[in-house]
Image: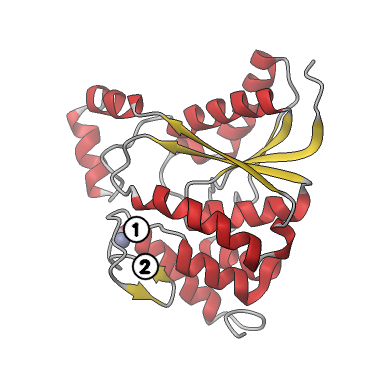
């Protein structure tokens, strides 16, 4: 059995988007040492990868819980996923995904792969907890975001690696409005502002337009979800968008 050098440690799957940014803040509030991992798989919206570094740097200033806790960042090149998605998707599936607004680089089971790679890093680093922003509530349609999928994968990983890794999913049962509320609860207006300004969700990678909820084209499904969630939170009553 793996002997954990740091049991109160976490590795956060940090893409540079809103959900994973809130997960990073959540982890920093709970664990003594927090590292991040990102995946470069040839995504269309590369801007998400580009905002990661700036967000991490500014987080230390904007969020006191990050100081002394935020550790290394790991960026893995998974460009092979682009080749898989080109060859593995049926024509029907490809049309369906485009119609639903998902990126056409989508790889079935992508989160299974990401979490398995993250588990390999965590194992090597002696990290016990792996944090991911997957969610059933504002359901993306990805079956690998489901709670049962994650629980089954945790069992498989631990059997396969003779480990006791824990897959943490703090956003699993909350919607986007509650995700903004969680950011506010964790780090107040400063953390909310940092997430608005320095994370990215838009599928088109558009950072030319600034809305109250952040940058984006304002019309793609990712922008719709982020904007609608922000609005519900902002209009939702006490301790919401008010400073
Ligand atoms: Zn957009």
* Quarter of the C terminus within the rendering: bottom right
- Secondary element under disc 2, as helix, strand or loop, is strand
Q: Between 213 and 5, which is closer to the camera in this rendering?
A: 5
The answer to whether 125 appears left or right of 174 in the picture is right
Label 1: element kind: loop
Judging by the rendered image, the residue that carries numbered circle 2 is 215
* Observer able to see residue 181: no
Quarter of the figure with residue 228: bottom left
Q: Is residue 117 above or below residue 129?
A: above
> Ligand 1 within 8 A of label 2's CB?
no
Q: How crowded is mark 1: few (under 14 residues within 10 Å), some or many (20 or more)?
A: many
Residue 14: image location, x then y, percent: 53, 46
- Quick one: label 2, few (<14), some, or many (20+) residues within 10 Å? many
Residue 59 lies, with reference to residue 118, above or below; the image says: below
At x 69%, y 20%, the residue is 158
Q: Quadrant of ligand 1?
A: bottom left
Residue 194, horizontal then vertical, whole percent: 54, 68
Name the image quarter holding the N terminus: top right
**Residue 30, placed above or below residue 187:** above
Q: In the rendered image, which residue does mark 1 sit on?
A: 202
Q: Which colour scheme is used?
A: secondary structure
Q: Where is residue 122 in the image (x, y as percent from the top left)?
A: 65, 29
- Seen in the image, is 224 located left or right of residue 115? left
In three-dimensional space, the C-alpha distance between marks 1 and 2, rounded to whole angstroms, equals: 8 Å
Q: In terms of image quadrants, where is residue 165?
A: top right
Question: In the rendered structure, which disc, 1 or 2, sits on the residue that comes first in sequence?
Answer: 1
* Some atom of ligand 1 lies within 8 Å of the CB belonging to the residue at label 1: yes
Place residue 5 in its image quadrant.
top right
From the top left corner, tell me how far across and down residue 98 is, in percent.
23, 45
Residue at 57% across, 70% down: 192
Kindly check if marks 1 and 2 are in contact, taking CB atoms under 8 A apart as contact: yes
- Would you say 73 lies left or right of 30 here? left
């Amino acid at each position: 059995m793996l002997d954990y050098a740091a049991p109160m440690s976490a590795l956060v799957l940090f893409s540079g988007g809103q959900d994973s940014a809130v997960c990073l803040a959540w982890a920093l509030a709970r664990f003594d040492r927090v590292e991040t991992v990102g995946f470069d798989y040839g995504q269309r919206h590369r801007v998400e990868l580009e905002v990661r570094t700036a967000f991490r740097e500014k987080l230390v200033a904007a969020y006191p819980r990050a100081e002394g806790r935020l550790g290394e960042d790991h960026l893995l090149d998974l460009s092979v996923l682009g080749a898989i998605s080109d060859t593995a998707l049926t024509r029907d599936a490809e049309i369906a995904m485009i119609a639903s607004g998902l990126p056409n680089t989508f790889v079935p089971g992508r989160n299974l792969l990401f979490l398995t790679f993250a588990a390999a890093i965590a194992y090597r680093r002696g990290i016990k907890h792996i944090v991911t922003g997957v969610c059933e509530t504002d359901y993306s349609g990805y079956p690998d975001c489901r709670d049962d999928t994650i629980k089954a994968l945790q069992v498989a990983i631990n059997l396969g690696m003779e480990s006791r890794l824990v897959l943490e999913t703090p956003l699993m049962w909350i919607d986007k409005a509650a995700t903004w509320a969680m950011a506010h609860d964790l780090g107040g207006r400063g953390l909310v502002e940092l997430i608005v300004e320095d994370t990215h969700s838009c599928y088109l990678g558009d950072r030319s337009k600034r809305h109250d909820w952040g940058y984006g084209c304002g019309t793609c499904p990712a922008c719709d979800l982020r904007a609608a969630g922000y609005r519900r939170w902002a209009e939702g009553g006490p301790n919401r968008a008010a400073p």
